[in-house]
Amino acid sequence: MSDAYVGADWDDIDPGETILLGLNFADDVATGDSISSATWTCSVASGVDASPSSRISGGPLISGTLVQIMVTGMLPGVLYRLQAYATLASGQIVTLYSHVACTPAS
């Protein structure tokens, strides 16, 4: 299993926002296969946050090949890396990640 960057970051978010972010695994799920479960991790790519995993609120939502997660309480000045791990019905585990920056509203 290798990390796969989706190629684009999400739009910046404000520290007060609670927002749903998602990654689409359409290129990783073969015809006839499906996503049976998923997990997410949140880490710091740059900046300081002593507990980035606490920014994940609730469990993953799966709709077809789209895997989503709610995030909240992001800290200003931090670039977060959010990574989804999708377990397929075939037993394969695939992963994607992207970044979201937290910037104060201007």
Image (cartoon, rainbow, N blue to C red):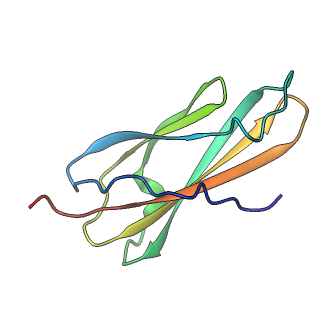
Relative side of 37 to 66, left or right: right
Q: Name the image quarter holding the C terminus.
A: bottom left
User: Image point 13% across, 58% down: which residue?
Assistant: 105
User: Image point 69% across, 35% down: which residue?
Assistant: 26
Q: Against 61, is 69 above or below?
A: below
Q: Against 17, is 105 above or below?
A: below
**In the picture, residue 39 is in which quadrant?**
top right
Residue 53: image location, x then y, percent: 49, 58
User: Image point 29% across, 62% down: which residue?
Assistant: 102
User: Image point 38% across, 71% down: which residue?
Assistant: 49
Q: Name the image quarter holding the N terminus.
A: bottom right
Relative side of 56 to 35, left or right: left
Residue 91: image location, x then y, percent: 90, 37
| Residue nearer the viewer, 81 or 42 | 81
The residue positioned farthest toward the right in the image shown: 90
State how many labels appear: 0
Residue 17: image location, x then y, percent: 24, 46
The residue positioned farthest toward the left in the image shown: 106
Q: Against 41, is 47 above or below?
A: below
Residue 89: image location, x then y, percent: 85, 28
